[in-house]
Image (spheres, grey):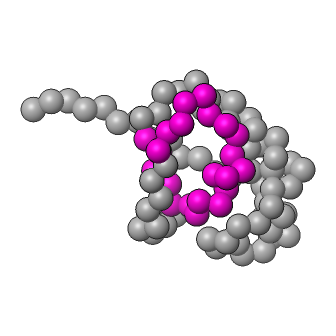
Amino acid sequence: MKNIMLTVYVTRHGETEWNKEKRMQGHLDSDLTGKGKPEALLLGEKLKDINFKRINSWQSDIPYGRAGKRKKPVPIETDKRLWRLI
C-alpha cells in the first residue's frame, strides 16, 4: 500500500460588511470591509507560493472572480456538500 500525504488548508474570508454588522451571512456574498481587503490580500500572499494541484471549496464561485491572480491557474472544484462541515 502506498503512503499518501495530504495537506489540508482551511481558510476564512476577510471581514465583510455583514460580519461587521454582526448580521447572519449564511452562504450569501457581502463586500469586504476596509479591514477585510488587506486580510484577503495577506492570505493570498501567504498561499501564493504553494504549488496547489487542486482546490476544493464549499463557497460560491463569486469571490473567485475577485480573487488575486495566480501565477499558474489551478482548477477550483466547488462542492456544496462540504457546507455541512462548517
Magenta segment includes 64: yes
Q: Quadrant of residue 61?
A: bottom right
| Residue 77 image offset from top left, x and y in percent | 45, 53
Locate the N terminus and report the quarter of the image it occupies.
top left
- Considering every residue shown, the one lying at the far left of the view is 1
| Residue 16 image offset from top left, x and y in percent | 79, 60
- Which residues, given as a range, are shown in magenta? 54-75
Who's the residue at 58% across and 24% down the image? 49
- Considering every residue shown, the one lying at the far right of the view is 34
User: Is 74 in front, or is 80?
Assistant: 74
Rendered position, 30 above or below 39 = below
Who's the residue at 80% across and 61% down the image? 31
Magenta segment includes 28: no
User: Is 54 in front, or is 26?
Assistant: 54
Indicate left or right for 82 with 43 as reference: left
| Residue 15 image offset from top left, x and y in percent | 78, 55
Q: Main secondary structure of the magenta part?
A: loop
Who's the residue at 86% across and 48% down the image? 35
